[in-house]
Image (spheres, helix red, strand yellow):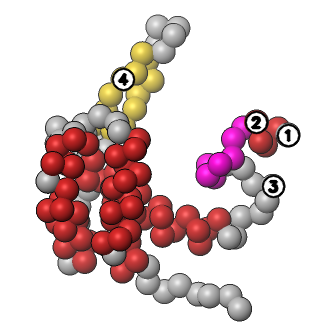
């Protein structure tokens, strides 16, 4: 039986999902976004930060912060622009991904490799 999803936002803001999303963001570490809040600073007030995200998402008042543009030097002297979201926004992105990815993964063909978890360019070549 195929399931049809109509609303998923309540799955995104579930505290268990936000906590798991936080663990993923923490494990990736990363630098501060435009707000200057580091992963460590976010963790110092973790319970309040996650409850605030929960509240904002639930009240449909969550607004992501602008993305910080950073230029990463390349070996040939050029730079590669990189956008660094705020830690809180990375938590929400990860929470969304945890809900949406399984739904879309089930629809992809096995021969599809682009931007999928645990699949690489080398996998596509093989």
Q: Which residue is mark 4?
A: 71
Which label's residue is closer to the chain start, 4 or 2? 4
Mark 1 to mark 2 CA distance (whole Å): 6 Å
Q: Report if residue 77 is visible in the image.
A: yes
Q: Residue at x 59, y 72 (%)?
A: 103
Q: Which residue is mark 2?
A: 122
Circle 3 packing at 10 Å, graded few (<14), some (14-19), many (20+), is: few
Which numbered disc, 1 or 4, marks the residue closer to the eye?
1
Which label's residue is closer to the chain start, 4 or 3? 4
Q: Residue at x 29, y 34 (%)?
A: 31
Spot occupied by residue 95 in the image (x, y as percentages of width and height): 39, 63
Residue span colored magenta: 115-121
Label pair 3/1, CB-CB below 8 angstroms = no
Q: Which residue is mark 1?
A: 126
Q: Residue furthest top?
A: 77
Q: Which residue is mark 3?
A: 111
* Residue 25 belongs to the span the image colors magenta: no
Mark 3 to mark 2 CA distance (whole Å): 13 Å
């Amino acid at each position: 039986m195929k399931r049809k999803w109509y609303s998923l936002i309540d799955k995104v803001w579930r505290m268990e999902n936000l906590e798991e999303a936080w663990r993923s963001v923490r494990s990736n570490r990363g630098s501060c976004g435009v707000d200057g809040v580091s992963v460590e600073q976010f963790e110092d007030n973790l319970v309040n930060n996650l409850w605030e995200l929960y509240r904002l998402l639930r009240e449909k008042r969550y607004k992501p912060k602008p993305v910080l543009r950073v230029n990463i030097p390349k070996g040939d002297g050029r730079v590669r622009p990189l956008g660094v979201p705020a830690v809180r926004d990375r938590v929400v992105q990860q929470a969304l991904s945890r809900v949406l990815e399984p739904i879309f993964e089930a629809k992809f063909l096995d021969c599809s490799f682009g931007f999928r978890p645990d699949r690489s360019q080398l996998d596509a070549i093989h």
